[in-house]
């Protein structure tokens, strides 16, 4: 996945044609998230509310959106971003996220990101959500502002069931002492939204600090089954 910057496709590494969108070649059909739950943004074939958003507010965030569905084509990109030291990827990926931000019509006061625990960040050398925010910032004309800190070094949530994820992530975040989120609309960046446990917990803390709304924007989101009408 570690191809040189600006020469080859960010997905397959193939040569780029001249009129290429955001560093992706024409042969790579990325899984765009075109139908999704109007609240949490998770993908389903028919769109419509998911079982966690239909008739109730299960998430602490107000809405979530992602340009891609997690799966073939984007899985490798996310893996390179998280574990492959591919620090050049956010420059391209942020452009897709900016499109989703504008499509959504939200206007954020503060752009921030899901923090890593300092131990994890030290080991990895960077926080991929912070890199995405830094590249998104000029595209949407905001300054990224760290306002959360991760006080708990949580286990990898990827293989856990939803209840276990929620339990593991509970109490993992705190507002930084200098953060002032009162009455602010927050745009929260992360790489992937799956069960929404991480974004939901961040949003709960932000709302606890008085934030007016929390809009979650990730690169990719998971597939859900829609609720039968
Ligand atoms: Zn390609
Ligand atoms: Zn939903």
Image: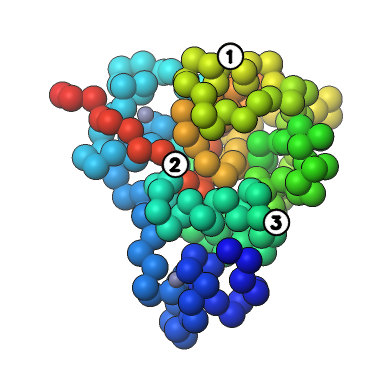
Tag in front: 2 or 1 = 1
Q: Which residue is mark 2?
A: 221
Q: Position of residue 15 (x, y in %)?
A: 49, 81
Say which quarter of the image contains residue 115: top right
Tag in front: 2 or 3 = 3
Q: Position of residue 124 (x, y in %)?
A: 76, 46
Tell me if residue 159 comes above or below residue 30 in the rendering: above
Q: Secondary structure at mark 1?
A: helix
Q: Earlier in the sequence, mark 2 or mark 3?
A: 3
| Quadrant in the picture for the N terminus | bottom right
Q: Position of residue 65 (x, y in %)?
A: 45, 42
| Numbered badge on residue 85 | 3
Tell me if residue 112 comes above or below residue 204 in the rendering: below
| Quadrant in the picture for the C terminus | top left
Say which quarter of the image contains residue 158: top right
Tell me if residue 199 comes above or below residue 210 in the rendering: below
Q: Earlier in the sequence, mark 1 or mark 3?
A: 3
Q: Which residue is mark 1?
A: 167
Residue found 52% across the figure and 29% down from its top: 159
């Amino acid at each position: 996945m570690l191809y040189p910057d600006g020469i080859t496709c960010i997905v397959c590494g193939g040569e780029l044609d001249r009129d290429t969108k955001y560093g992706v070649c024409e042969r790579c059909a990325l899984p765009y998230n075109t139908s999704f739950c109007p609240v949490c943004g998770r993908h389903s074939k028919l769109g419509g509310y998911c079982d966690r958003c239909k008739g109730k507010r299960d998430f602490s965030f107000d809405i979530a959106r992602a340009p891609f569905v997690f799966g073939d084509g984007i899985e490798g990109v996310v893996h390179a971003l998280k574990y492959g030291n591919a620090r050049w990827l956010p420059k391209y990926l942020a452009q897709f996220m900016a499109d989703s931000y504008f499509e959504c019509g939200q206007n954020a006061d503060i752009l921030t990101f899901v923090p890593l625990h300092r131990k994890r960040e030290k080991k990895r050398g960077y926080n991929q959500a912070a890199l995405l925010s830094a590249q998104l910032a000029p595209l949407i004309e905001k300054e990224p502002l760290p306002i959360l800190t991760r006080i708990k070094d949580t286990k990898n949530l990827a293989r856990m069931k939803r209840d276990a994820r929620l339990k593991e992530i509970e109490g993992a975040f705190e507002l930084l002492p200098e953060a002032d989120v009162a009455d602010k609309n927050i745009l929260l960046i992360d790489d992937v939204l799956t069960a929404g446990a991480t974004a939901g917990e961040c949003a709960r803390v932000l709302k606890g600090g008085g934030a007016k709304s929390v809009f979650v924007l990730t690169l990719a989101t998971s597939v859900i089954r829609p609720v039968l009408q």
